[in-house]
Amino acid sequence: MNPTLSELEAKATGKKVAFGGDAHIVCDNLVRIYKTEGVEVVALQGLDLVIDEGELVAIVGASGSGKSTLLNVLSGLDVPTAGVARVAGMDLLSMNARDRLRYRRSVVGFIWQQTARNLLPYLTARENVELPMKLAGGPSGASRARSRRERADELLELLGVASCANRKAPEMSGGQQQRVSIAVALANSPQLILADEPTGELDSETSEQVFDALRTANRELGVTVVIVTHDPLVSEQVDRTVGIRDGRTSSETLRREGAEGQIIAEEYAVLDRVGRLQLPRDFMNALEMERRVRLELESDHIGVWPAREEPSND
Amino acid sequence: MRIWLLARVHLGPVAVLFVLTLSACLLVAGLPRATQAAYDEALRRALSATPAVQADLTVAVESRSPEEDLHERAQFDSRDRLWREILPGELRPLVTGAGHMSAKTTLTPITGTGGKSYLNLGWLSDGERRVDWVRGRAPGAPATMRYEGKTIPVFEVGIVEEALREMGLGVGQTKMVGEHDYAAVTIVGAYRAKDPGDRYWSHNADLLHVSKIQPPGGLDFEKHITALTSDAGLTVLSGEGRNLTYRWVLPIATGAANALDVPGLRAAVAEFDRVVALQSNGTASPYHVETGLPKVLGDFLAALSTAQTVMYLVLGGLLAVALGVIVLAVQLLADRLDHALTLARARGGSLRQVAGAAAALTGLAVVPGALAGYALSYLVPGPVLPVVHVGPVIVVLAAVGFAAVRLALAHRRPLHERRDDVAAARPSAKRVTLEVLVVVLALVGAYLLRARGLSASAGQDPFLLVVPVALTAAAALITLRCYPYPLRLFVRVAARGRAAVAFLGLTRAARARSASVLPVLILLPALAVSVFAAVISDGIAGTQRLASWQQVGAPIRMISDIEIPATAIEQVRRTPGVAQVVPAQTGRVQVGYGAERAEAIAVDVAQWRSILGDAPVGLPSLPDGALVSPELRGRGTLELGWQSRLKLPTRGVIDSVPGFYATGKFLVVPLSVQIRPAVNTLLIKGDASDATLTELARLVPSATVESQERALLAIRDDPLTGTVRSTLVVVTVALAAYALLAVVLSLVVGAADRARAVSFLRTLGLSHRQAQRLTVLEILPMILFTALAGLGLGLGLPAALGPGVDLSSYAGDLPVGDYSLDLFLPSALTAGLAAVAVLGAYAHTAISRRLSLGAVLRVGDLT
């Protein structure tokens, strides 16, 4: 049935549903090109990513695949060259410096891999947690200072490092430092926490503690958590793992609990909005696929064949 | 951000910054005070050394008719008040003391002496207080008498004791004066000045001494004396028929003179002359100001402007270098703060918070330092100039401003990823054009300055000040742009060799990194200015020595008015401390048979040469004949009339006879040409101690004894000279210290970076010894190249500015032109810098040896 004029008008003037809808994090065809003194590096080559509010997502990928660049973009530290990046409804490309500062202060918190880089060594854990609150400003005064202190203690308590409140960074273990770092990241009640290999420098037992802390933040405070990691221990414990290859999202692994309580992990390739798909490298190698492949649409799937071979009938 | 906590954490850089600011502010505020104090002292000495009659302001007017006569003291007083009222404001602080007034006649002949004796009449407002009556009494009221049918006044006068003898006058005598308007003068007393040395008598020397004047063409001397008359005498003293001049002397208080006011003073004197002339009210002869003050001030200003030029250059260089080192220290602090500020910025610190914290921390270090330096500068005696206040403010603003701007730029974006591994991009065409323009402008400026020159009396020439700055900037640009090129040649050579360290070290050194810009910008002017100061200082010292030798001509010289007897010469020879005595005879000799005269000295030139030794003056050898001045050249054989007739061939032309003649006609002949030499001069080699000189003066009472050392001391004693030299020395030392500090600071600033690089290489098998060599090779080339460029610039600047900087007034009026290349100090500076760099590199690798590789590499891993 042909649409009526009023229907067409409503469609034209009505808001189009954007890619990703109202997801918490939306990256659409994100491009980031570094230009340093004449050398150009394309770190993100049209990356798509959608993460919903309250999700705990791991991003994995080989070294140089663009994970850290993505995290820097999402944390408001870096500005993408092109594409769409939206976090909590805020467009990261069109933000000015002031908006970006506000974004970093109140929307996002992050944790770096190097424990030494997250904390100021001459401040105690509590002072480190208070620092972002102080930087965010607001009214000063004794009651304000008290509430900051209470908030810091609360966060340290939540993350299981209340005993370290008065210790300085060098007096804490690596795991404690990272957990304090999580508290620092949570100081201004952000909606999103980004962690760049937070367990990269830690042994497996301590990693477990740090990951637990992140999960606590996710569950107790409802914060969306995105972790970049190499650590299978971490990537196996999250609901969704996004793989990045050559600056693009290449695969997603979803985990769900099976009927008998076992964890079932299913790996998916990612199809982007224009229909591009990255085939896993081992698949391509096994069938010696290169340059051209043949596709065939079936009723419930699409077949992919090497160009030279005739498709079989099954 | 808690600033106190940050200060405590980064105590080292903060303390360095504090000390640097303190020293810079002390130097910047203190040195100008000291130099200004010396300028003032020099002006006061110059004024004191000038006879009062030239330095003081004298308003004079001649009386030509009875209407213009002043007969009462009150008339003088009212005009004196008037002069002081209309005195321009600039002169008021100088004219504070009570002056005096006078009325004097000039050229008043004693009747019947045929114009050979003059007895002038003089009245002094305070004459009574200034003299003691030694004979007779003070003059009283005048009387009258009849002379040649007219009633003429009879003045009672007193006369100076000396004149009674010299002019054959006596107390009680009455002399007629004048050739047609007669007057009688009765000498009733003779006086003696209470204090003949007082500057007061400079104005009234005619009352104290008989002046003898040889009229042109005449053989006999005219004798002039002014006699002192009383207030009552003034009532009948009239300008009608006499040359009568009234004078109001406004003495200058030399102690109140201030070098800063000098240009204003010259204008004020001219203004005073103008307003004084306006008071004339149509009288036949106008009031006018008689003073030599503008000339004295002009001469002083000429000497001053040179001193100021050198001081501006040197102090400006010092300020620039001090600022550079402070900025380097701020950079060190900023580097240390980098982690905290990056973290704060990433965690939501605004640019203002981040830059503000850095600026506040820098201010915390710099402001107390500046205040302390400013306060300490008050211990330096001298007037408070604007620069005393402005200097420390500039230092503080530069330091805090640099900290704020640098960190604001660095943290403009929260994530500042530096790609140190990427080779420097090629400079843009715009930048290269700009740099070439600066270099070309500097060279053209230097050429124009040399071609044009300038007169020192013209005051400050901004061009002269700009050219060295431009040259320094040009040298810095050339050094920065070009120093990698020769290094790359070495790299190419090193690449062929088997040793990896040389190749690696030189390669790292050859990479023109922006981090090395600041040390170059500090080292280059520091070395250039200190070498410049050292060369100028050496030049002045050498020329002062030359001037002293030219003044005296021998280690010790005795000149007597009369012949020195042979026995006295023998005694001089035997005096302890005297090594050698060369007798000489000086005199004015007749050249040829006419009226031509020349100054001559007869001396054994070979002996004279031997006592001169390695002095910077000398004479060619002269076994016979004569050495003549340029004015007597080309005469062939000279015929001289000196005791007897002498015929001497010219053996050479000399510009001067050291210690004796430098201008006009003069000649040197061997002493042996005199049949009976009348020795009146002794040239002595020996110990020129005070005791010896006193002994020599005692042996030959008729002689004046001078020594080269004393002459040198006298030249050096001048406050302007002393200050110029001591300031140059202070600045040289300060700049050398700053240069060393710059090296140390740049080592510390780059330490973390280098530690990381060395650690990486150590994982590849670099030994500690190799690491040390690597560090040295990496640092040394930049320091050596900059040091050489600075050295070249410093040595070249005096030559480039040569005509613009006239230092003759500091070197006994000899032009300082021969800037000898004494390479000791510059080489010592360069060697010192290189040594500190090497030591620093070794110390650095020794310290980093203690760090474990893993720690360094992990901390350094910023990805």
Image: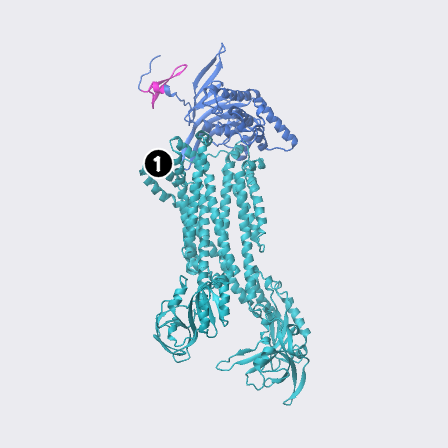
Could you say which is closer to the camera, residue B760 or residue B829? B829
Image coordinates of residue A129 in percent, x first then y, are: 57, 28
Q: What is the quadrant of residue B187 in the picture? A: bottom right
Could you say which is closer to the camera, residue B814 or residue A43? B814
Image vertical order of residue B410 relative to residue B811, above or below: above
Q: Is residue B851 magenta?
A: no
Q: Is residue B238 visible?
A: yes
Q: Residue at x 37, y 19 (%)?
A: A282
Could you say which is closer to the camera, residue B743 or residue A249? B743
Q: Which residue is mark 1?
A: B500
Image vertical order of residue B54 relative to residue B342, above or below: below
Q: What is the quadrant of residue B63 in the picture? A: bottom right
Q: Which chain is depicted blue?
A: A
Image coordinates of residue B105 in percent, x first then y, are: 60, 78
Magenta span of residues? A283-307
Say what secondary structure mark 1 lies in. Answer: helix
* Colour applied to chain B: cyan
Q: Quick one: quadrant of the N terminus of chain B?
A: top right
